[in-house]
Image (tube, rainbow, N blue to C red):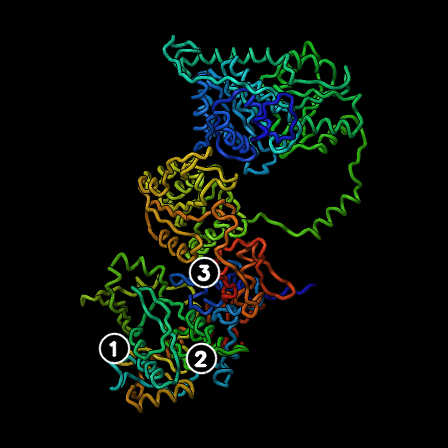
Amino acid sequence: MSHLTDPKEGATYLVMGNEAIVRGALEAGVNVASGYPGTPSSEIIENLSKIAKERNIYVEWSANEKVALEVAAAASFAGLRALCAMKQNGVNVASDFLLHLVYSGTRGGIILVSCDDPGALSSVNEGESRYFARQLEMPLLEPGSFQEAKDMTKWAFDLSEELKQIVMVRSVTRMSHASGNITYGKLPAEQRKAAFKFKGFILDPNEGIITSAPVEWKHKDQQEKIKRAKEIFESSPFNTYEGPEKPELLIVTSSACYLYSKEAVDVLGVKDRVGILKLGTTWPLPPRLLAKHMASTDKILIVEEVIPFMEENVKVLAAEKASEIGVKKFYGKNEGLLPSVGEMNPDYVIAALSSILGINYVPVSPEYDQSAKLSAFVHAPARDQVFCPGCPHRASFFAIRRALELDGRDGFVCGDIGCYTMAVRPTGFETLKTVHSMGSGMGLASGFGKLGQFGMEQPVFAVCGDSTFYHAVIPALVNAVHNQSNATLVILDNGGTAMTGFQPHPGQDFNVMGDSVPAISMARICEAIGARVEIRNPFKLDDTLNTLIELMEEKNGVKVLILSQYCALSPQRRGKKDYELSVDETVCLGEECGCGRFCTRIFRCPGLIWNKEKGKAEIDQVICVGCGVCADICPKGAIKRKEVA
Amino acid sequence: MEETKITRGQQEIREKVISQGLCTGCGACINLCPYFRSYKGKTAILFPCTVENGRCFAFCPKIEVDLDRLSLAIFDEPYDGTQLGRYRSILTAKAGKNMKPVTAQAGGTVSALMYFALAKGYIKGAVLTDRKGLEPLPKYVTDPEDVLKCAQSKYTAAPTLSSLNTVVEKGEEQIGVVGTPCQVLALAQMRTQEKPYPIGLVVGLFCTWAIDFRLFEPFMTQRIEIRNVRKVDIPPPPAEIFQIFLTNGEKIEIPLSEIRPLVPQGCAYCIDMTSEFSDVSVGVLEGRPDLNTLIIRTERGQKLVDEAIKEGYLTVSEMPKENLEHLVWAAGNKKKRGLKRAKEEHLINVEPLSYLRLQGEILNQLTQ
């Protein structure tokens, strides 16, 4: 049994932020949970799926975030409690539905959990989901501790039900993926019954139809909910203050930045001079609470990550309340004291506080700093991001790169979101030339493939993963075929949503709860759309290369090549070696002409190592997964492959 | 000042040969390593290589070609810049009565010599150029009968020497090669390395220019069904036409003025029309579509020709004076044109890396 379903009230566990959110949802009696995998959010749905049967929860990985939110909203419309989880840019995908949902309102408690990734630790953006709360006028909560992550999640369901509005709970990487002790509350015993009521008066929020129209009426109603939220937030226990009654400086902060602020105040020993107002309800801001604290000081520092969202909101309030509280001096991102990109950390806050308070604080001596930097530069080996040993993407991009170079017309590949995004780096032979959002590779290729009439002669490729295909590539492929674009889509089918931890996708015959479900064939979808479809095993290098060339030479139309091979870390391949690899040192050319360390310098599978002393390649038997591809790339055939019985 | 290290590898080939437009796709750098490949007549660099002294560079006929060094190594004489290069004699020739009949170009001299050389063990194998549709494909043969399948001119630039690299790697020896002047020049580089290539015979072809297959393929696809091509020919001047013979007996003629734009840029820098570093060189004979011109350059070439005549594989006769004069004129023109252009673009006798090197005096004479 998972500790997450421990019924004991008051039990204390060390849990990850995302687990705390799960426990909070359980204590709120969540019935339906949906989402699309994306770091740092994935553990929420994963953990819920593990206890789905036990707690009679319906959990699914949806095809994309928009569908996920629709699935969750349906549960709310039927009176159930629902949670929908995604990473920051997933909210963009869901936002079209969300815009209409906030007008129509909801019934059973529903929360949208967005896990943002300041600093883009696992993303190709550090997008802000907080702005959606303001733009779409829905309440926003941000936990500032692990306990709050649980308590706030539970409360968010109650708030949603009270307001009949979806509530957004926003976490960040350092909240979702760090761990802390939390004390469990009570798990509800009762189950709700689902029923969608629509026979009442058309505008009845409980029994009428659910839609965003009439827009003005619904929009006004929505804004009334925000006003009520403000009132509720005025006395919320998630907004806390610590510090002197009349601080010299007031820090207004939220989320993980609360911890950085506390540390900074502690390190500088300025508890008596600086107060910290930690906000858990960050949109709409409670005006009276803010006014009270702002009135107590002349200087205000706002500490938050990435864009100055809270800073702007606090300043608007300060302007509105200026006649009561007086004119304040603000510090934060707008005048450049704190950075507007990347993660926040205690050092930044310490530096800001030192500057405002006139404290001369030197975190490390300049000599130490310099020598640390120098020794890191000299001694630390350069470590690039690399595909795992035996990764099929390496083989796929090896073939794609060779095909493009052979063709020689400066063909290029539009990339997409997955492990294969790393193919902008040498590990994928620097094959990708564009990377944006999910599905954008094929969309861009569709556009590039129409530029022939302007003299563009370069062959156009797009790549996507299997999960990405279902998420957002299908409309782009439809577009390309219908508009007679000329491009080739390579689907790197590694049998799961590999990058985020092998979550199942619609191409698989099982779901996240372990049920047998119908698999949706990518090849048949592509054929039905009207593309020529080929399927190859990327480990067969020459076969893949020849197919790529053949498709590239086909002058017109959209071609699809599905390169099908399990991820090296997948449950299907893990621990199973197809081949034992070894290097015949008498044959290995090493650095000589004819090779030039081809396997360790170009192919760069981490399972291949360069023995400097011997001037020969070797196999790292500990990490080699035995895919055998390197035996085919060695120009001298020095890498020997023996089938494992 | 620190001296810049001169490397002679892939990067130099990329910058000084391919980017300069000098590459004719001869195949000398292909199949030596995983980095160079030929595709549809073009040399492709698949991945960056950091080897500082590469065979790609050493073999390339478009970079650091020291004509004196090559001439001394092959003929024991320095490069003198004469129109036809060093030779012993010039004859007209055609296949003899003992040679099997074959659809060849002109007199079938090349096929006859290669057939004979293989059959009599002068060479153990031959690197030739076959054709698939209009695409020239390198081919290594050991059976004399297979020579017949590779007969006829291709006119398209072919990576023939890639096949030579492959068979040398496999340990083959006494290899005969039929090549165009750029390929014969690359062969001269290969034969004069520290570890010389085991070449048993070099039969050079006359060549004024070749056609870029990448341009030729779409050009021809618009006009004919490529798989129906039986033979292509450029009859000697003043015909000025390109002929295509189809399997159904039809003949299509295209003015050479339409073909010339399809010539690789690299051919414009070529100074050799008659494959000056061969054992024997063979071309057409003006006004006589049934005969070839045969230039015998080396002792090895002489011996082969003598034996072939003796055994009835080759028939020769004297070269008419006016034909010889015209050949000298045409070859001289090509040499001058190529040298002039290369000199104007600072590609000759320059440091640190030069396309060609030859004695300054001879260069001045030829480019006056």
Distance (Cα) linking label 2 and label 1: 27 Å
Residue B323 visible from this viewpoint: no
Q: Which residue is mark 1?
A: B102
Residue A90 visible from this viewpoint: yes
Where does residue A620 sit, x and y in percent of width and height?
A: 58, 57
| Tag 2 subunit | B
Where does residue A318 sit, x and y in percent of width and height?
A: 66, 15
Looking at the image, which residue sits at the far top?
A: A201
Relative to A340, is A540 above or below? below
> Type of residue at label 1?
Val
Q: Nearer the viewer, mark 2 or mark 3?
A: 2
> Type of residue at label 3?
Ala
Q: Does label 2 or label 3 sit earlier along the sequence?
A: 3
In front of the other: B269 or A138:
A138
Relative to A458, is A21 above or below? above
Mark 1 secondary-structure assignment:
loop
Q: Which residue is mark 3?
A: B44
Where does residue A177 sit, x and y in percent of width and height?
A: 61, 33
